[in-house]
Amino acid sequence: MEPEQIFWLVALVVFGIAEAATVSVVSLWFMGGALAALFASVLGASLGFQAALFLLVSIVLLACLRPFVKKYVAPHRTRTNADRILGEKGMVTQEIDNLKATGAVKIDGVEWTARSQNDQVIPRGQVVRILKIEGVKIYVEPVTEPAGKGE
């Protein structure tokens, strides 16, 4: 076996191991390029041609397959747990005052410790929108619409 053939075979195995070790498709295209270069090497092509073929096949596979992989194979992020309340509305059950470190908001029947996003005092009974979560606290801003789900 020629040194170039060994190189491309090792590259193919390394890219295969990298692909198997990752959760997403990252080196499948390089495996195809290494396989094409290996075949070119077996057929007696020059090292420059093998390298160019590796790059060309890898780029073509990346350009053609990545959109498909991204759309159909890549895992979709499903919001679970607490982050599902981001953007939701709730009702202030205890006045929110950042200086006094007080405040609570009820969302979907669950009461959360709350802070005002812009340090304004928000009175009890005000409808608020959840902007972010840090630890066990939510940061909110007042809204003028009815609470809907948060009451």
Image: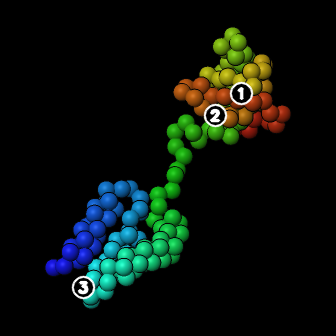
User: Which type of secondary structure does the marked residue at label 2 adopt?
Assistant: strand
Q: Which residue is mark 2?
A: 132
Q: CA distance from mark 3 to mark 2?
A: 58 Å
Marks 2/1 in contact by CB < 8 Å: the verdict is yes
Comparing 73 with 111, the one in front is 73
Report the number of numbered marks: 3
Is 108 left, or right, of 27 in this rendering? Answer: right
The x and y percentages for residue 35 are 31, 77
Q: Which residue is mark 1?
A: 117
* Of the two numbered discs 3 and 2 in the rendering, the one whose residue sits closer to the viewer: 3
The x and y percentages for residue 126 are 78, 26
Q: Is residue 55 above or below residue 98?
A: below
Tell me the quarter of the picture where residue 23 sits.
Answer: bottom left
Query: How are the colours assigned in the image?
Result: rainbow
The mark that comes first in sequence, 3 or 2, is: 3
User: Mark 3, residues whose alpha carbon is within 10 Å: few (<14), some, or many (≥20)?
Assistant: few
Q: CA distance from mark 3 to mark 1?
A: 65 Å
Q: Which residue is mark 3?
A: 42
For badge 1, the amino acid type reads Gln
